[in-house]
Image: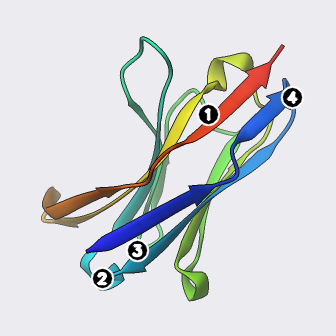
Amino acid sequence: QVQLVESGGGLVQAGGSLRLSCAASGSISSINVMAWYRQAPGNQRELVARSTNSGSTNYADSVKGRFTISRDNAKNTVYLQMDGLRPEDTAVYYCNAYRTSWGRRVGEDYWGQGTQVTVSS
């Protein structure tokens, strides 16, 4: 079992920055991918950024060059540094952790509780 605890959301003006944190505990060795998703009212939940244990990262086109996903392995924490925020970034942001094998998700899928990010114009 893996538990994810998120923090760092809030209200910020356009052009500002926030850093989201997701602290993992439990059977951490059972996961090898951590990701950030977001969901705005009326929209589908979408992938924002993803990080693998091997160090590779992926970003949604809408956040490339503005957001950075990173890890502090000693603290079992993944971060999402959000710079140059826009009103379109307003959403609930969720931390996601899972394991892949041969390119396919395996085992259980873990989610944080979500943290609200609101960007005003």
Circle 2: element type: loop
Q: CA distance from mark 1 to mark 4?
A: 13 Å
Task: State which tag comes first along the sequence, 2 or 4.
Answer: 4
Q: Is residue 63 above or below residue 26?
A: above
Mark 3, residues whose alpha carbon is within 10 Å: few (<14), some, or many (≥20)? few
Q: CA distance from mark 2 to mark 3?
A: 15 Å
Task: State which tag comes first along the sequence, 2 or 3.
Answer: 2
Residue, disc 1: 63
Residue, disc 4: 15
Picture disc at residue 27: 2
| Quadrant showing the N terminus | bottom left
Residue at screen point 17% across, 58% down:
103
In the image, taking residue 63 as reference, residue 55 lies left or right, namely left
Q: Toward the viewer: 52 or 24?
A: 24
Circle 1: element type: loop
Question: Which image quarter: residue 23?
Answer: bottom right
Looking at the picture, the colour scheme in use is rainbow
* Front position among marks 2 and 4: 2
The percent coordinates of residue 7 (x first, y second) are 64, 55
Mark 1, residues whose alpha carbon is within 10 Å: few (<14), some, or many (≥20)? some
> Label 2 is placed on what type of residue?
Ser
Circle 3: element type: loop
Residue, disc 3: 53
Q: Is residue 25 above or below residue 45?
A: below
Task: State which tag comes first along the sequence, 1 or 2.
Answer: 2
Mark 4, residues whose alpha carbon is within 10 Å: few (<14), some, or many (≥20)? some
Mark 2, residues whose alpha carbon is within 10 Å: few (<14), some, or many (≥20)? few
| Quadrant showing the C terminus | top right
> Label 1 is placed on what type of residue?
Val
Question: Which image quarter: residue 65?
Answer: top right
